[in-house]
Amino acid sequence: MASLGAAVIRIDAEPAQDKRRWAIGNIGKQSMHLDYTGDARDAFLKLVAKSDILVESFLPGHLAKFGLGFDDLRAVNPRLIQVSITPFGQQAPYRHYRGSELVVSALASNLWQMGDADRPPVREPGEANFFHACAAGVFGALLAERERQQTGRGQLVDISAQEMGAGRNTLWILQHQFAGGRTSQRLGQTIDLGWGGSRAVWALADGYAFFQLPPPGSPLERALADWIAEVTGEVYESGDLAAAERFLATLSVKDVIAQAAPRDVRIMPVTGPRGVAEDPQLTAREFFVEHAGQQMPRRYLAITQDAGRGA
Amino acid sequence: MSGPLAGLRVVDFSWVVVGNVTTKLLGDFGAEVIKIEGWQRRSGERSRPIIPTEDPTSPDNKHWFAHIASSKKSVTANLKTEEGRKIVFDLIRDADVVMENFSPGTIERMGFGYEALKAINPGIIMASGSIFGQTGPLARLPGVDATGAARAGRIDASGYPDGPPLIPSHLYGDSLLPFFIASAMLAALRERDRTGKGCRIDGSMQEVIAHQMWPLIDRVLQGDQACWRTGNRHPDTAPHNVYPAAGEDRWIAIEVWSDAEWAALCTALGQPELAHDARFATLAARKANEDALDAMIGDLTRPHDARALMAQLQEQGVAAGAVQTNSDIVERDPQLRERGFLTDLHHPVLGDFGHQRSPITLERADSQVMFRAPLLGEHNRSVCKDILGMSDAEIDALEAAGTFR
């Protein structure tokens, strides 16, 4: 919301312990320390009375214990839009369930799908579902704002991180409904988006790459075959996974970056933390900003009124 | 239409996933979304059979399309004809938003770039979704969802700590970026209503995923290498993992964030004395003995039904979740069912099936107005008549001339 120009006031009951980590999620905001459930409750309500949107992520019922539930806040400011982002949403039997990313991804069925068949499933990195839920929260707030333009009244926007995660499984939700209850499987470095397994992660000489064998007979397959022939002198037979594996394992990340794109071989080396921080594409688009000596993402989208400008 | 976006008109060039997810968000909440397609240039998912069909060449029987194109209209305007192009330009002249997700540079080559559209409608908001954005050295590199993820740290951080990077069998960037684009559209509409000026929105999957990954990336850059590719463990707490449950390949995820929750877990698992075991009594001790901790918890969870244990642990204030399959979330999850995750709609070719609503719950139940996906060219006549004011005779003539093929 701040990146779209809103005046965002971040409220914490106490100063953050890890200021560096706190700063990443709070660039572009103002900050207040306010004991809003205690001595500063009245001051908080005055701020609510003059605000358009409140964003919170406590379990349902927590703020109500302090007389700060949405009905209490709405009485102070009928135009208030409250965005509540929680693990399972404001209604239904799991609404009071606790869960961070791991538990949410388990119940969303995302966790099930990654890993080896003979090992436990393994989760996605970072806060994938909650980050997604935050993006939905912004959209929800702006939808509610459009309704408010017509009605003059605010409302509660309810975002469930489980629903966000489950919603990404469209392909497998359709497989269940139309393919006799077909269930996804964990296939290691192979992915199956519903139409058959396809090896997706390959070892390079000094790293890994995302790559899928091109369809047999396609121009993309010919491009791969030409590349293998030129470097190794070997003839690539259509769909020969082992030959592709042997070839790619001889290439460095630098080789792949230099040679693949000009040949229209669609392979992308997998980038680690340093690679992302120094990524030439992100740098060229001025994605990062340095704030108090700390590198961090500057914006979510490039928005301009001049099509020729980048960021 | 009664959704909050009623009255908003979107001309939609989307052809595979990221654009179509964006415009479904708009259509589900009441915007009038008009997909611009052609018999020769169909929206990509009309051609991708994720489930075998009797007639693979039909544009109207693809299951994925039936989901991501719900709440939209379809117009087939042959852009190789002057009349077809005029239809689209006339629609854009009075539209609010244009969406596209071709490879960067394509929409300009088609003659529908932002500068061209701005010339006929200064208030137009044009959004593009792509892997790397519209500018920069990688902008024109082709790719899919995982290409952006590969370049944003997501794949490198995925997997077991002792194994190679992995990719899950579901999408992320293709689903994440649309929420940012749709939000920016609504913000831009507000600005346009104030200034009369539109804008160009340029969304990059690599960038939104890099945003999501940045807290982890920053930790590594500060020297905390151990927080990268941790599998199911968390650098700041323990236990935090997936444990076996009764049945074949059934699992339960458990997170403990305090000593009190640790004591509650021990009690719930019938071993209250473990809370005082020096190997596990504090967070530091649990992290130091995490292998033994996980093995012991696994032994204790193994006899239990995952769902029953989840309920029992949650009752004690411990975060726990049965690891569900795609079938579980459709058939067995009471939370998703009660919240209306799937809505049965009738599709003229595929029959009745559960369509996913947009995962934003507003107070008014009818804020979402989802309807089934269009057949190819289904709205040619109604759009030309109701929006462009053409007569039946004019439309018949266009049809006869092949404008809609």
Image (tube, coloured by chain):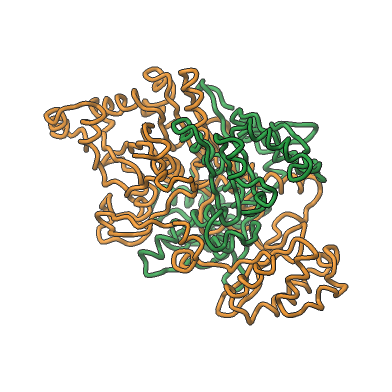
Chain colours: A green, B orange
Residue for point 25% across, 52% down? B58
Residue A213 in the figure: left or right of residue A218: right
Q: Residue furthest bottom?
A: B303
- Considering every residue shown, the one lying at the far right of the view is B278
Where is residue B320 shown, x and y percent of the image? 64, 66
| Residue drawn at the location 18% of the way across and 34% of the way down | B402
State the residue in front, B177 or B255: B255
Q: Residue at x 41, y 57 (%)?
A: B342
Q: Position of residue B376 (x, y in %)?
A: 26, 44
Residue A208 visible here: no
- Position in image of residue B78 (x %, y %): 26, 33
Residue A15 figure quarter: top right
Q: Quadrant of the N terminus of chain B?
A: top left
- The front one of A168 and B137 is A168
Left or right: where A162 falls relative to B350 = right
Q: How many marks?
A: 0
Q: Can residue B62 be seen in this snapshot? A: yes
Q: In which quarter of the view is residue B341 placed? A: bottom left
Q: Is residue B109 above or below residue B353?
A: above
Q: Is the residue A183 above or below the residue A146 in the image?
A: below
Compared with A265, A33 (above or below) is: above
Quadrant where the C terminus of chain B lies? top left
A25 and A62: which is toward the camera: A62
- State the residue lying farthest toward the front: A75
